[in-house]
């Protein structure tokens, strides 16, 4: 529906012309036609209705109903006048085109079509009754040719004026359609201006980000190389002291020298972890179809051989479209942690995959020390550990790197665990392609090959 606003009030100003036309026609009929009867007063009443409608157009809640009543009243007036004003030859027939034009503008496509069909049928109807009956006449004009001609010229001129006036209104740019288009154009120009400003800001932010990345690369390089040099020197000096004073060292001094060397090694590992963590954001994902079963074998081949552990693969690992480096890195981190943080005589690890509509969920479960729920978020923060480093040697960066990789890739990683009962880490990658089916069970005591039963 049309909304009531200033545009509609401006459009309704065209209705202001019609009441004056009604007044002019009625006055002419009363002045020139003896005993004109009730018809001029009907025309004046219709004009008064139109004028009232015009002044209250901005406050009418159901504007389309008002327009329909107005146009139907105009049709009814022309229809009934035609019986005594010439039938098919009435000058009022010229107003049919005017009303059709207004119907399209005020009521839209369906309203315009309705009045087009209505007036076409009305014209055919008056043709038939004028041709085959005596229902129509020029009684209003007393069959006076001069009055008939005057009526026709007045109707012709005024109908042409209304059409021309409406056309001029449309061409002038003051009508609703043009105003709305211009308003939309102005809004679009404003949005484009804001978008250009946003693009400029984005370009500046991009430049600043590139600068920050370069500085971060320099920092990472310094951390990786320059800071390691004095650490290595400290470690070497500790070795020299241990060799030079080998015969004179007591157990406490030996422990202190060993602590120094361990701390140097830990610092080097922390610097390496920091370097790896800083590089995650600046690596582009290389998406391709990979067989995660093959990737799993590659991960297992890199695991340490000095621990007693058993890895069981509980489901067929699928073909997926993913980043091979990300998948292997995350899986390696999770399995390495499962082995590292385990206080049992034999470490048992289970690897499985579950497919859903949007994700493939890969899980690594263990029988290790477990994690309290209050630490679930902390373990994914870089350099945060929940166990003493002397009990379980760790940089506290592995899970932080895994989470950052998943975040950058659009995946997810989560943990479920109970203290002293083991943990299950699950990382989920977006599922792009239907994977292999099957639910085979595989068990592997490492130092052997992957066997399926």
Image: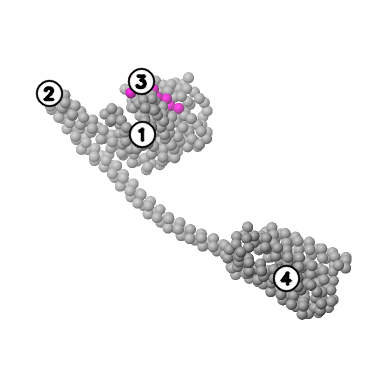
Check if mark 3's residue and mark 1's residue have beta carbons within 8 Å: no
The residue segment tinted magenta is 343-352
Left or right? Give the position of 314 relative to 155.
left
Q: Give coordinates of residue 206: x percent, y percent.
A: 38, 51
- State yes or no: residue 347 in magenta: yes
The residue depicted at 30 percent of the width and 47 percent of the height is 215
Mark-to-mark CA distance, 4 and 2? 128 Å
Mark 3 lies on residue: 346
Q: Identify the mark nearer the N-term, 4 or 2.
A: 4
- State yes or no: residue 48 in magenta: no
Secondary element at tag 1: helix
Q: Give coordinates of residue 208: x percent, y percent.
A: 35, 51
Secondary element at tag 3: loop
Mark-to-mark CA distance, 2 and 3? 39 Å
The residue depicted at 45 percent of the width and 34 percent of the height is 428
Q: Give coordinates of residue 59: x percent, y percent.
A: 61, 64
Quarter of the view holding residue 127:
bottom right
Mark 4 lies on residue: 45
Q: Identify the mark nearer the N-term, 2 or 1.
A: 2
Label annotation for residue 375: 1
Q: Nearer the viewer, mark 3 or mark 1?
A: 1
Q: Nearer the viewer, residue 137 or 429?
A: 137
Mark-to-mark CA distance, 4 and 1? 85 Å
Q: Nearer the viewer, residue 282 or 358?
A: 358
């Amino acid at each position: 529906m049309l909304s009531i606003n200033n545009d509609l009030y401006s459009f309704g100003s065209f209705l202001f012309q019609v009441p004056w036309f009604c007044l002019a026609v009625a006055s002419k009929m009363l002045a020139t036609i003896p005993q004109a009867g009730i018809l001029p007063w009907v025309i004046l009443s219709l004009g008064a209705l139109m004028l009232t409608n015009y002044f209250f157009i901005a406050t009418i809640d159901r504007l389309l109903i008002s327009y329909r009543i107005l146009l139907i009243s105009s049709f009814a007036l022309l229809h009934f006048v035609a019986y005594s004003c010439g039938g098919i030859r009435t000058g009022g027939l010229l107003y049919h085109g005017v009303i059709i034009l207004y119907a399209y503008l005020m009521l839209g496509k369906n309203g315009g079509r309705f009045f087009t069909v209505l007036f076409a049928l009305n014209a055919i109807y008056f043709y038939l009754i004028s041709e085959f009956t005596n229902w129509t006449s020029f009684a209003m004009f007393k069959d006076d040719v001069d009055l008939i001609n005057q009526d026709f010229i007045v109707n012709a001129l005024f109908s042409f004026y209304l059409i021309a006036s409406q056309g001029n209104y449309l061409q002038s740019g003051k009508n609703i359609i043009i105003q709305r288009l211009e308003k939309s154009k102005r809004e679009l120009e404003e949005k484009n201006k804001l978008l250009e400003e946003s693009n400029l800001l984005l370009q500046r932010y991009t430049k600043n980000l590139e600068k920050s990345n370069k500085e971060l690369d320099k920092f990472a390089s310094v951390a990786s190389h320059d800071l390691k040099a004095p650490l290595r020197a400290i470690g070497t000096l500790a070795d020299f002291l241990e060799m030079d004073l080998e015969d004179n060292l007591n157990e406490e001094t030996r422990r202190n020298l060993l602590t120094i060397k361990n701390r140097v090694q830990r610092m080097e590992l922390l610097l390496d972890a920091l370097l790896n963590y800083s590089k995650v954001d600046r690596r582009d994902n290389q998406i391709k179809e990979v067989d995660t079963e093959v990737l799993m074998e590659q991960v297992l081949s890199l695991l340490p051989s000095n621990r007693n552990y058993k890895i069981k693969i509980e489901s067929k690992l699928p073909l997926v479209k993913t980043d091979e480096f990300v998948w292997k890195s995350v899986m390696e981190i999770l399995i390495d942690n499962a082995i590292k943080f385990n206080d049992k005589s034999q470490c048992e690890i289970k690897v499985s995959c579950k497919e859903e509509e949007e994700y493939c969920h890969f899980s690594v479960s263990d029988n290790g020390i477990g994690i309290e729920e209050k630490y679930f978020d902390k373990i994914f923060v870089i350099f945060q550990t929940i166990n003493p480093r002397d009990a379980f040697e760790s940089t506290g960066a592995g899970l932080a790197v895994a989470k950052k990789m998943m975040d950058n890739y659009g995946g997810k990683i989560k943990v479920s665990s109970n203290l002293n009962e083991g943990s299950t880490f699950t990382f989920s990658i977006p599922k792009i392609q239907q994977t292999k089916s099957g639910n085979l069970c595989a068990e592997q005591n490492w130092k052997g090959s992957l066997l399926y039963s």
